[in-house]
Amino acid sequence: MGEYSAVLTAMFESEEQIKRIEVIIMLLAKLYVVLELSPDVCPVCRATLNHDVECPINLAWSLLDTEQQHDARTAIRAVALSVGFDDSFADPVTH
């Protein structure tokens, strides 16, 4: 998690706990990107387009460095594009 790696190491006892926290942070950060692409309100803080300062999704996003934020945006946009262009999703009626 970039500059916060030392803090995570100090806060948690085992390498397994640190890895689990890193996964949670990345999932929340990717949710941040999903919500950027969506007109829906944040399911956590109920804000539209912006999160309040205490929102865990916003906090997770702020823990990522610029490169990690770019990677998260790229991954989510790739998934969104692949779903959008997949013919099985374009026609919801299955024959």
Image (cartoon, rainbow, N blue to C red):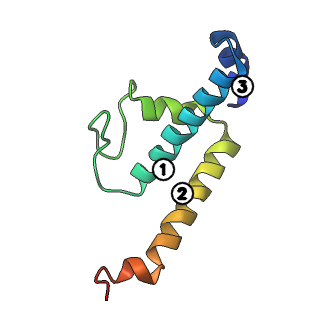
Left/right placement of residue 90 relative to residue 3 reads left
Give the residue pinned by disc 1. Answer: 33
What kind of element bears circle 3? helix
Disc with the residue nearer the chain's start (2 vs 1): 1
Residue 57 x/y as whole percent: 44, 35
Residue 90 x/y as whole percent: 37, 81
Left/right placement of residue 69 relative to residue 81 reads right
Q: Amino acid at mark 2?
A: Ile
Q: Is residue 51 above or below residue 71?
A: above
Give the residue pinned by disc 2. Answer: 76
Q: Is residue 88 above or below residue 16?
A: below
> Which callout, 2 or 1, points to the residue nearer the camera?
2
Instruction: Report how far apart the C-alphas of labels 2 and 1 lie in the structure.
Output: 7 Å
Residue 39 x/y as whole percent: 30, 56
Left/right placement of residue 20 relative to residue 15 reads left
Disc 2 crowd, CA 10 A, few/some/many (<14, 14-19, 20+) = some
Disc with the residue nearer the chain's start (2 vs 3): 3
Instruction: Report how far apart the C-alphas of labels 2 and 3 lie in the structure.
Output: 23 Å
What kind of element bears circle 2? helix
Residue 61 x/y as whole percent: 53, 36
Q: How many discs appear?
A: 3
Give the residue pinned by disc 3. Answer: 3
Tag 2 near tag 1, CB within 8 Å: yes
Disc 1 crowd, CA 10 A, few/some/many (<14, 14-19, 20+) = some
Q: Amino acid at mark 1?
A: Val
Disc with the residue nearer the chain's start (3 vs 1): 3
